[in-house]
Image (cartoon, helix red, strand yellow):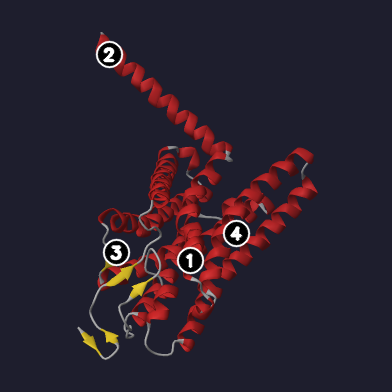
Amino acid sequence: MKTGNQTVGTDFILLGLFQYGPMDSFLFVVIAILFLVALMGNIRLILLIQLDTRLHSPMYFLLSQLSFIDMMYISTTVPKMAINFLSNNKTITFLGCKIQTFLFLVLGGTEALLLGFMSCDRYVAICHPLRYPLLMSKKLCWFMVTCAWTSSSLNSLIHTAHIFQLHFCGYRVINHFFCEIPTLVPLVCQDTSQYEYTVLLSGIIILLLPFMAILTSYAYVLTVVFRKSSGKGQTKAISTCSSHLTVASLFYVTTLSTYTRPHTLHSPEEDKVVAVFYTIITPLLNPFIYSLRNKEVMGAMRRLWNHVHLYRNMTVGNFTD
């Protein structure tokens, strides 16, 4: 139903990340493979932390939460994009767009806050190792996780409720591959300059402050390591911190670029490329960065594999007998 230049109660049209040329089909296959690898990587890490009692510590509890968020985060956007591409149907219902926006903001905000809390955990573990068991208690870890989920959910609820009660103009064409606030703002019929200030404020609180906390904590960590460790220890610390900071920076810089600029400065084609980094690449890299460069996780993987191999040999032996 249309009223003037406003379209009421109709679906949105997602133009998507791909068109239908040979190169786009290849890129779609690549994205699909990355999605499956990200899912398997995060599921593997969650199961590993749950099954190995040696990994039942604050650091790995927070890491399992991060993997769960990443698994849900990438599942919020990629499956719908795949369905639209394979069915050649670019529509998403009003309710579907609303749900996707809400979930995306909840999961993205929770990840941003959780990464900041994880950096605090590393700071305490390295800079105050004797006080670590006291400071990083199980109760505090649950408080951190609860705080991240609650704050992000409240922020998401406010923004989703506000943007979807506004009137959208024209045919509701979203030049993107999923629904998010910056792609919906240009479709609104009225002035959104005041609302965009609230989006900026949310971006500063949920994205910029945790990012600054991460940079500060790792700066202290490196300072302590350089003061107390040998050349080999310093090299290892630099290698570990640089990989963590690279992935964190990839997430924060790209999301800040999207959520702290007014919509007049956005380019749809650039935004889609930038969005790939914080919706697909980051959830893909996190489980590997935090596991492949971690001796305890790699040791747990070897122990689990040995148990599986032993169980399989015993099963085969019993069957042959």
Q: Mark 2 or mark 1, which has the lower sequence index?
A: 1
Residues at circles 2 and 3 in contact by the CB criterion of under 8 Å:
no
Q: Which mark is residue 90?
A: 3
Q: Which of 28 and 24 is in front in this view?
A: 24
Q: Mark 4 or mark 1, which has the lower sequence index?
A: 4
Residue 274 is left or right of residue 131, and the answer is left
Residue wearing tag 2: 318
Disc 4 or disc 1, which is closer to the eye? 1
**Tag 2: Cα neighbours inside 10 Å, few (<14), some, or many (≥20)?**
few
Q: Residue 88 carries which label?
A: none
x 47%, y 29%: residue? 303
Residues at circles 2 and 1 in contact by the CB criterion of under 8 Å:
no
Q: Which of 262 and 128 is in front in this view?
A: 262
Residue 310 vs 272, above or below: the answer is: above
Q: Position of residue 117 (x, y in %)?
A: 55, 60
Residue wearing tag 4: 249
Q: Mark 4 or mark 3, which has the lower sequence index?
A: 3
Where is residue 107, by image quadrant? bottom left
Residue wearing tag 1: 269
Q: Mark 4 or mark 2, which has the lower sequence index?
A: 4
Whole-number angstrom distance, CA of label 4 to CA of label 3: 32 Å
x 35%, y 17%: residue? 313
Q: What element carries label 1?
A: helix
